[in-house]
Amino acid sequence: MISSRSAGKNTIFIYDNISGAYRAATNDDLIGGIGKTNNNELILAQKNTILDISSTYGVSVLRDETGIFFGATIQENSGLLELQTNNQTGSNCYIQSIVRGINQFGSIGESSINLRVDNLPTGQQNAKWGYFDGQNGAGYGIDQSGLYVFKLINSNYIKTHRSDWNGNQLSGVTSAYSLNETLSCHNYVCDISCNSLENYILIKNNNTNRHDKVLTNSWNDNNILIDKNQPLRVEINNSTDVGQFKVSVGARSYSIIGGNLDIQKRPLVDSITNYTISAAENVWSPVMAVRRKSTFGPSNRANSVNSRFHGFTAATDQSAEFMITLNGNITGINWQNPQFRSSSETICEVQKITNNDLGITKTGELVSRETLLASNKHDASAGSQENAYFGNGGELILFARRTSNNATTISATLHWDEEY
């Protein structure tokens, strides 16, 4: 299988005066053709990897959001994730990363997915993969007419099939490269900058017997993508046809090339006070929940800002236990803006639960768990950057339970970062 990265870990990225973009340096570069400062210093670019996801251990709800409909399946097989439709119309599924790539002005966002099409689609069957969320983004796809690249703006897919690529069509006739997407995994890459979008495929060079990054299509206009912060996503769909259609996914990665990773983070807090746990001992009661809004901003576009759990603090008058879960489900409550925050300044909404009579037990995957063994003891628990992002698919919920026969009064505060 090809590596998830289109360039080596220690690759030197340089500014190319001809293309006006950063790229990996090669042995063919002449010093005179590389961008330099006024002091004759080479202009180099740092590569910051934000996402590097392996498929070896299957799907994780702490890392991936999924949708599975009408009998479709997503499962791990020999280190790859297999997405397969069922033998009925409308069968479809998708998987996308909870963490979204971040695009910065003056840099390039490099998204790549290692993928194989296991059988060619028929009729209206199709598959798409790349840097998109169903409303905005870019990537690759395949339908009955063959392989294509696309850019997606406000749910409008603009497709260019392989026969119309303005780069290398990988036919093997006029170049050293040939592509049969059903035979082996390839690394499909999208590079996104402020005013250009380019599609690459990492593919074997038949002349040199090595793998090269080959430009397949370039979109050159001033309105490349409206929203450049997107997840890595793969989806397949039977549409109006029947039959099993399958693709296999390997590694997925996203990196920023050029500039430093400098994201403004706004830590937000919301607190619960004088909350009394009166339920039976050993019963987990929901105390507070936070989730990312589905839309955000003046245009009410899909919310594409990353949210990361940072930690929580708590105090009790009795011994108690606390638990944070991700991708649980709280119903019958009223979602509100965090305290002292306007709706235009926070991408999340919270619920302070004022009673424990909702009949909801602990749900979701465990993120953090703490025990307060003495009354009025304060405690803080920090979340991990790798496993505590939360997206639109579920809520981050704080549960508590009392550990004695006495009613327990608690005060708790959740902390999270919003990266925009």
Image (cartoon, helix red, strand yellow):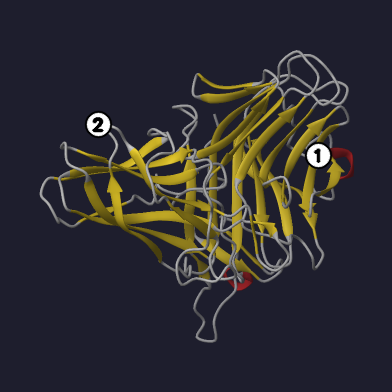
219 vs 292, left or right, is right
Q: Looking at the rendering, in which quadrant would you find the C terminus? A: bottom right
Q: Residues within 10 Å of mark 2 (few under 14, many from 20)?
A: few
Instruction: Identify the image quadrant of residue 107.
Output: bottom right
Where residue 179 sits in the image (x, y, percent)? 74, 31
Work out whether residue 147 or residue 329 is closer to the camera in this orientation and state it.
329
Indicate which label's residue lies in the foreground, 2 or 1.
2
How far is the residue under mark 2 from the one under mark 1?
Answer: 55 Å
Type of amino acid under label 1: Tyr
Taking depth in this image into account, of 144 and 392 the one nearest to the observer is 392
- Counting residues from the start of the chain, the first of labels 2 and 1 encountered is 1
Mark 2 residue element: loop
At which x and y percent is residue 258? 54, 66
**Tag 2 and tag 1, C-beta contact below 8 Å:** no
* Tag 1 secondary structure: strand
The residue under the point 81% across, 25% down is 125
Q: Nearer the viewer, residue 221 or 37?
A: 221
Quadrant for the N terminus, please: top right
Q: Is residue 209 visible?
A: no
Q: Which residue is mark 2?
A: 282
User: Looking at the rendered structure, which numbered label has been put on residue 322?
Assistant: none
Circle count: 2
Q: Amino acid at mark 2?
A: Asn
Above or below residue 218? Residue 134 is above
- The 10 Å Cα crowd at callout 1, few under 14, some 14 to 19, many 20 or more, is many
- Residue 299 appears in view: yes
Residue, x 51% and y 73% (percent of image)? 42
User: Residue 403 falls in which quadrant of the image?
Assistant: top left
**Residue 305 pos. (x, y %):** 56, 58
Give the labeled residue for mark 1.
148
